Image: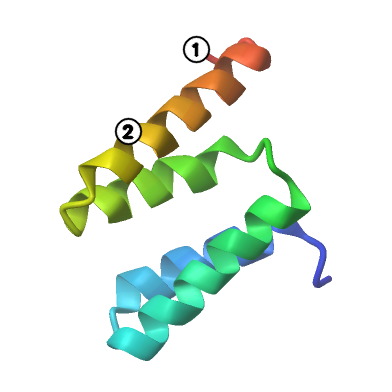
Amino acid sequence: DDHFVMAHYNLALALLYLDQGPVSFAEAMKQLQYAIELDPDYYEVYDTLAVIAANHGDYGSETEYRAKSAAIKKKYGLE
């Protein structure tokens, strides 16, 4: 099902893990963004994006993604 958030998230993780270069990375990012479109409260996506941002030295984005994830966790009592 193309609207199954976990499928897109898990595909992104697999693409990142396999690390097949820029095309794989771009597709992983596309899958993560689509997962957010399907479910903006899927905090695991923001956690993953935070790690990616940190690995690329984009600490401003890392902070934003971590804050978004924390807000979602708080909203659902998952802290």
Residue situated in front as seen by the camera: 14 or 52: 52
Looking at this view, name the residue that lies furthest to the front. Answer: 60
Please give left or right for residue 41 compared with residue 46 in the image: right
Q: Residue at x 40, y 49 (%)?
A: 48
Q: Distance between the residues labelled 1 and 2?
A: 17 Å
Residue 43 visible in this rendered orientation of the protein: yes
Q: Quadrant of the N terminus?
A: bottom right
User: Which comes sooner in the sequence, label 1 or label 2?
Assistant: 2
Disc 1 secondary structure class: loop
**Where residue 15 appears, x then y in whole percent?**
42, 76
Residue that carries the numbered disc 2 in the rendered image:
63
Crowding at label 2, few (<14), some or many (≥20) Cα neighbours within 10 Å? some
Please give left or right for residue 41 compared with residue 59 in the image: right
Crowding at label 1, few (<14), some or many (≥20) Cα neighbours within 10 Å? few
Disc 2 secondary structure class: helix
Label number found at residue 79: 1
**Where residue 49 appears, x then y in whole percent?**
40, 51
Q: Which residue is drawn at 58% across and 13% down?
A: 74
Q: What residue type is labelled 2?
A: Thr
Residue situated in front as seen by the camera: 27 or 2: 27
Residue 6 visible in this rendered orientation of the protein: no
Dividing the picture into quadrants, the one containing residue 25 is bottom left
Q: Residue at x 47, y 72 (%)?
A: 28
Dividing the picture into quadrants, the one containing residue 20 is bottom left
Question: 10 above or below 54?
Answer: below
